[in-house]
Amino acid sequence: MKIGAIAKQLGTTVRTLRFYEEQGLVQPRRSPGGTRVYDEADVDRFAAVLALARLGFSLQELAALAAVRPQSGTGDAASREVLAKLTAMDRTLAEQAAAIEAQRRDLARADALVRRCRGCTERPVRSVCDQCEVSRGVRDSQVLQLVWETPARD
């Protein structure tokens, strides 16, 4: 399989896949002429690296995980180390999930507030909006701190 086809299949770039190779995360076979030969196992490995990298895991973390089995003296040692790393990754994902849920709740609050401005014919500037009851809820939403301009400073 050609790397361009793999990149297309996985929704990434050839450069990204080559970078993962350079980092030692994927090691394709070589033809007698030196051409890289990718098989389904390589595609699966690229997919795993991409999925974890897209979730925010660093290449150092992924390389450390990938290196556990080859560097372990026994299956038991490998199992213990892999399980420790998987547990840490799961903890990271749980923290991310909680942060995402909190942000989604904030977006829902912001959505409800902003919808109340639909149909408003006034110019959306602080001097006008501060007089409206809707703007009183702006402080309850973190994301709206980015949308509403800051008050004038003396």
Image (spheres, grey):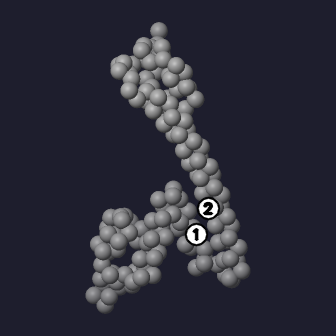
Question: Does the image show residue 28?
Answer: yes
Q: Are marks 2 and 1 in contact (CB under 8 Å)?
A: yes
Q: Amino acid at mark 2?
A: Met
Q: Amino acid at mark 1?
A: Leu
Task: Pick the residue in front: 119 or 106.
Answer: 119
Q: What's the residue at 55%, 32% (across, down)? A: 141
Crowd band around label 2 with a 10 angstrom C-alpha radius: few (<14), some (14–19), many (20+): some
Above or below, 55 against 10 in this view is above
Say which mark, if any, is on residue 65.
1
First along the sequence among labels 2 and 1: 1
Residue 67, image x, y percentages: 56, 73
> Residue 34, located in which quarter of the rendered image?
bottom left
Say which mark, if any, is on residue 89.
2
Above or below, 1 against 17 in this view is below
Q: Residue furthest top?
A: 154
Numbered disc total: 2
Say which mark, if any, is on residue 51.
none
Marks 2 and 1: which is nearer the front? 2
SS label for mark 2:
helix
Q: What's the residue at 50%, 22% (across, down)? A: 135
Image quadrant for the N terminus?
Answer: bottom left
Residue 95, image x, y percentages: 63, 52
36 displayed left or right of 75 = left
